[in-house]
Image: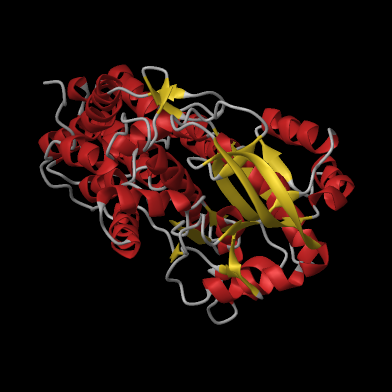
């Protein structure tokens, strides 16, 4: 399985919206690795945007300095967010990216032509619009641009794209997004501009092969990363050319690029297509999209420093719906961490280990039962939820073990039992906690490791609290 996230512009540091997609990709990667499947999880940064140039100019620093600094901040999310990506591509410095973009350009030359174009351009989206204002809420007014550009014959691929989507060869989830893309395609596709003047790009970007007065449109350049990053020994053949699942994760604002323009580019070039696209909605604050340009961005590293990685990952997975925006507040993050991590998971493990140490001198007996009705069905529930990219439902499925184990404690009340009953009950509970650690690993790898360490031995040590309450 080849899992990719979108690659964000680096005109500013990362915000919580970027963390959402990275954590979702990480859960998928860890889940499928746990099932013994080969996985490549890839992310990176889009360095060649005009937005990056303008941000550097506003700051009064060289573009390369700003791009390098902010790209490092994105790559640096790996540690704070417990990410397990296998590859990180930077489009301005990856040794094979420019050559790969040029190869794709030449492969589609039969579908390229030049013409004059005039339209309204949003620098924030790096996209032309028929009219304003920007639908993504960027504050800068749309710029009227008039220039000679290279165009791609997207219109040639309308029927082929419709067939791909209707036939399920290109699976788009959720279904509402599939229908949205299909409606856009079947309403009629117009050819699209795929270059910008080098002057307007301030000389930043990849020159059009054979036409140095133009640079490759940043979206064309960026989309190619899913292939150009596969430049290792047999990587392209293994992860893209072979028949395997190729999954793109993205926010709803860029679906047209990934579900329409990118497959058409690949069809034109005679290259294999992605198989699945999952589109998530936005994180908001007070109803407004969290973004670098909104002034309301939330630093995920600062959140981790304050509340811990488990609290941040868990809020993103437990609170964000498969469909619909999710409004973030620190109060909600704290409430979820206290309710689930402190009162639920932490309390369960602490109670179980304390009773094993108190009543059985730390020795772990064999379970009388394995809560099989719960633990045995969790794997299937998680598998089904993640097949449909429903991370909230998958996390809730894992949490049924916590809930059932806590109910089992109250039902059996080991502190009131004789020795034989204590052994049976506590053996069952330790077994449930061990199963929980395994199921939890894709979602909260740090928490899973801590639970496994607490209950993993033949003789348990006295417990240390896993999670103090954040709210006190």
- Left or right, 348 with respect to 97, comes to left
Query: From the image, which quarter does the N terminus lie in?
Result: bottom right
Q: How is the image coloured?
A: secondary structure
Is 431 above or below relative to 206? above
Residue nearer the viewer, 389 or 104: 104
The answer to whether residue 8 is seen in the rendering is no
Residue 97 x, y percent position in the rendering: 53, 71
- Left or right, 371 with respect to 188, comes to left
Residue nearer the viewer, 26 or 403: 26
Residue at the far bottom in the pictured view: 233
- Image quarter for residue 268? bottom right
- Image quarter for residue 418? top left
| Residue at 53% from the left image edge and 69% from the top image edge | 229
| Residue at 48% from the left image edge and 48% from the top image edge | 25
| Residue at 58% from the left image edge and 53% from the top image edge | 219
- Left or right, 47 with respect to 237, comes to left
Is 472 above or below relative to 239? above
| Residue at 29% from the left image edge and 18% from the top image edge | 410
Residue nearer the viewer, 116 or 242: 116
Is 93 above or below relative to 273? below
- Left or right, 275 with respect to 360, comes to right
Is 86 above or below relative to 443? below
- Image quarter for residue 111? bottom right
Query: How many callouts does the rendering have?
Result: 0
Residue 414 x, y percent position in the rendering: 23, 25
The answer to whether residue 444 is seen in the rendering is yes
Query: From the image, which quarter does the C terminus lie in?
Result: top left
Residue 186 x, y percent position in the rendering: 85, 35
Residue 463 x, y percent position in the rendering: 13, 40
């Amino acid at each position: 399985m080849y899992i990719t996230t979108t690659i964000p512009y680096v005109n500013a540091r990362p915000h919580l919206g970027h963390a959402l997609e990275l954590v979702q990709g990480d859960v998928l990667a860890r889940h499928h690795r746990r099932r013994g499947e080969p996985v490549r999880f890839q992310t990176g940064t889009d360095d060649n945007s005009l937005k990056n140039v303008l941000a550097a100019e506003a700051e009064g620093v060289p573009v390369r300095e700003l791009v390098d600094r902010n790209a490092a901040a994105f790559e640096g999310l790996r540690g704070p967010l417990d990410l397990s990506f296998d590859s990180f591509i930077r489009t301005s410095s990856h040794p094979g990216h420019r050559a790969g973009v040029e190869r794709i350009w030449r492969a589609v030359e039969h579908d390229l032509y030049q013409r004059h174009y005039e339209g309204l351009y949003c620098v924030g989206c790096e996209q032309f619009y028929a009219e304003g204002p920007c639908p993504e809420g960027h504050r800068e007014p749309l710029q009227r641009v008039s220039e000679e550009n290279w165009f791609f014959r997207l219109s040639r691929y309308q029927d082929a794209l419709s067939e791909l989507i209707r036939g399920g060869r290109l699976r788009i989830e959720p279904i509402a997004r599939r229908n949205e893309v299909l409606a856009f395609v079947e309403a009629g596709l117009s050819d699209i501009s795929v270059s910008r003047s080098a002057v307007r790009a301030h000389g930043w970007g990849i020159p059009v092969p054979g036409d140095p007065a133009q640079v490759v449109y940043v979206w064309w350049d960026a989309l190619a990363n899913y292939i150009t990053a596969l430049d290792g020994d047999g990587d392209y053949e293994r992860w893209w050319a072979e028949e395997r699942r190729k999954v793109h994760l993205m926010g709803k604002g860029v679906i047209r690029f990934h579900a329409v323009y990118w497959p058409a580019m690949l069809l034109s070039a005679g290259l294999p297509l992605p198989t699945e696209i999952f589109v998530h909605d936005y994180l908001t604050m007070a109803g407004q999209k969290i973004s670098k340009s909104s002034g309301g961005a939330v630093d995920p590293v600062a959140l981790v420093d304050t509340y811990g990685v488990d609290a941040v990952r868990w809020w993103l997975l437990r609170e964000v719906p498969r469909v619909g925006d999710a409004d973030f507040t620190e109060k909600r993050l704290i409430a979820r961490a206290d309710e689930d991590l402190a009162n639920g998971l932490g309390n369960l493990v602490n109670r179980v280990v304390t009773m094993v140490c108190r009543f059985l001198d730390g020795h772990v007996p064999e379970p009388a039962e394995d809560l099989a009705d719960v633990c045995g069905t969790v794997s299937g529930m998680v598998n089904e939820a993640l097949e449909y990219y429903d991370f909230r439902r998958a996390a809730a499925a894992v949490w049924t073990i916590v809930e059932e184990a806590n109910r089992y404690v109250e039902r059996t009340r080991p502190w009131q039992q004789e020795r034989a009953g204590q052994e049976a009950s506590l053996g069952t509970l330790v077994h449930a906690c061990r199963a929980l650690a395994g199921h939890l690993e894709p979602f909260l790898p740090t928490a899973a490791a801590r639970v496994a360490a607490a209950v993993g031995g033949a003789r348990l040590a006295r417990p240390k609290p896993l999670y103090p309450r954040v709210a006190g």
